[in-house]
Image (cartoon, rainbow, N blue to C red):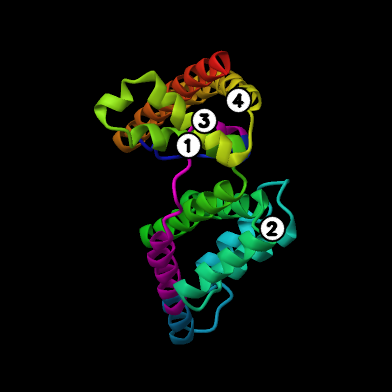
Amino acid sequence: AQTRRRTTSTKKMTTQMMTMQMRAPVRSRVHPAMRRVRQHKHHQHQHRHKAAPSNQGDDELAQAMANAQMAPPNVREEDFTNYYRILNAQSPEEASEAIDAMTRDGSLTEGVVEAALATYQTAQSKGEGPEIIAALKGLFEYLLDCYQRANVPPALGLIDACVSGLSALDDRARADDAAQDAVVRDVLRDAQMSVEEFLANIDMFLQSMTQQDAQFDAQVAQMRAEGVDEEREQQIAQLVDMRGAAKEQMLVIRAISQRCLMSA
């Protein structure tokens, strides 16, 4: 079964991608998010013209961006510029097109996603309205989806293909070693990757996941020590389930691959 990816930071996205399967980006999520952003900016524009002249009527989103720009030291000014270009899109469709173009030309960098996260977290810390926070969160998650899909290691995509192929087998074939082996062999043949190389990648992913376990447990312990509400506790439980399921699936694919290697 596919698992859903969640993360609170993008600083270790590359290794985090090794811990769970990829899922298709939910394009529809950027539409309501950008619509709320546009509605809010329009409302703020009207409000400024109705109020007496003042320097305190700055757009909340622009202010959040300004504050966030000083937050992550590893984010370039260009990354914030690209992110703000998405926020300034005149429609959800225009925002989606901009993200697609950035994905194709390589300008959708980890820094852009970091800029989105910093802006979202700044809005949260300043108590911005729930609509704006939800919009910024939705946009951050969409950008994270697109970035991770564009940078997924090839072998991780093959693991995902193997899991999908095994899931498509009927109950009888799923219990048949030969049928399982055939799924993995077909995936590797189409990708022109040897079983040895595939196994080496799986071992690397598993090692990375093991190294992350201690970090993950420490982060969860810190969050709980600071106090978590019911929603956050559910998110933690979901992450634990996702990590366990991802590791279990990878171990299954590893066992099948080892069998293929021995029978070659």
Q: Quadrant of the C terminus?
A: top right
Mark 4 element type: helix
Q: CA distance from mark 2 to mark 4?
A: 31 Å
CB atoms of marks 1 and 4 within 8 Å: no
Crowd tier of the residue under label 2, counting other residues whose Cα lies within 10 Å: few below 14, some 14–19, many 20 or above: few
Q: Is 18 drawn above or below residue 110 in the view shown? A: above
Residue drawn at 47 percent across, 73 percent down: 93
CB atoms of marks 3 and 2 within 8 Å: no
Q: Can you tell which of label 3 and label 2 is closer to the viewer?
A: 3
Mark 1 element type: helix
**Sequence order check, earlier mark of 3 and 4:** 3
Viewer-proximal residue, 239 or 45? 239
Q: Position of residue 25 (x, y in %)?
A: 46, 53
Q: CA distance from mark 3 to mark 2?
A: 32 Å
Q: CA distance from mark 3 to mark 1?
A: 14 Å
Q: CA distance from mark 1 to mark 2?
A: 24 Å
* Residue 35 seen from this side: yes
CB atoms of marks 1 and 2 within 8 Å: no
Crowd tier of the residue under label 4, counting other residues whose Cα lies within 10 Å: few below 14, some 14–19, many 20 or above: many
Q: CA distance from mark 3 to mark 4?
A: 8 Å
Q: Position of residue 85 (x, y in %)?
A: 61, 70
* Disc 3: which residue: 185
Q: Is 209 drawn above or below residue 103 in the view shown? A: above
Disc sitting over residue 98 in the figure: none
Question: In which image quadrant can residue 98 be found?
Answer: bottom right
Q: Is 5 drawn above or below residue 239 in the view shown? A: below
* Disc 1: which residue: 160
